[in-house]
Amino acid sequence: MKIPGPLALAAGPVLGAIALRMLAGTLRVRREEAAVAPLWAARAPLIYALWHGRLLLLPCLYGRRGAHTLTSRSRDGELVSRWIRRFGLVPVRGSSSRGGADAVRLLTRAIRAGREVVVVPDGPRGPREVLKPGVIALARLSGAPIVPVAVGASREWRLHSWDEFRIPRPFARCVVRFGEPGVGRRAARAVLDTARAG
């Protein structure tokens, strides 16, 4: 991927946020939130886990929750960080390949302060939909449950990228499904099963 230049870093997040909001305005979205509604009511800190290729709609739909979100330390990661800030998410810079231990510590600190966090367990470069151990380590260190998140669309484009990134087509029917919270390997398996069901 081409490294974003100064103009892309300045304009890309703004234009990207406008484009996503315009697209989301055409979609019919069903939200299946029953599994997490009691935890939201209790203001419990949570770890949301979803696959890299399915994350597009989440900032627009749930960014107002102000979750801390892991993004890479690359310049592409800087572009993503500026983009998600426009929806209310808080970027935490690090990845499994660069600064992973620091990222886990920062996310653990956020959880212990009562914040929610978002982790993409097959990012930043794959393999696609293969769970990496960081999310399990984070759950064990923080004691917060993992909530698998699935996103699906009736009609979508799939990019020719490592993650087969998915973009809902305008006016598609979409569903966002939050799975049962859990900690440890059982929760990790739920991430696999729930996220692929989207």
Image (cartoon, rainbow, N blue to C red):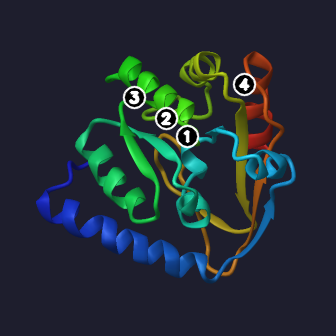
Of circles 4 and 2, the one toward us is 2
Residue picked out by circle 4: 188
Dot placed on the residue nearer the N-terminal end, 2 or 1: 2
Secondary element type, mark 1: strand
Label pair 2/1, CB-CB below 8 angstroms? yes
Tell me which amino acid carries mark 3. Ser
Res. 110 mark: 2
Spatial distance from mark 3 to mark 4, Cα to Cα? 18 Å
Q: Residue furthest right?
A: 34
Of circles 1 and 4, the one toward us is 1
Residue picked out by circle 3: 95
Name the residue: 41% across, 77% down.
18
Secondary element type, mark 2: helix
Dot placed on the residue nearer the N-terminal end, 3 or 4: 3
Label pair 1/3, CB-CB below 8 angstroms? no
Can residue 187 be spotted in the picture?
yes
Secondary element type, mark 4: helix
Q: Is residue 124 above or below residue 136?
A: below
Spatial distance from mark 2 to mark 3, Cα to Cα? 16 Å
Res. 117 mark: 1
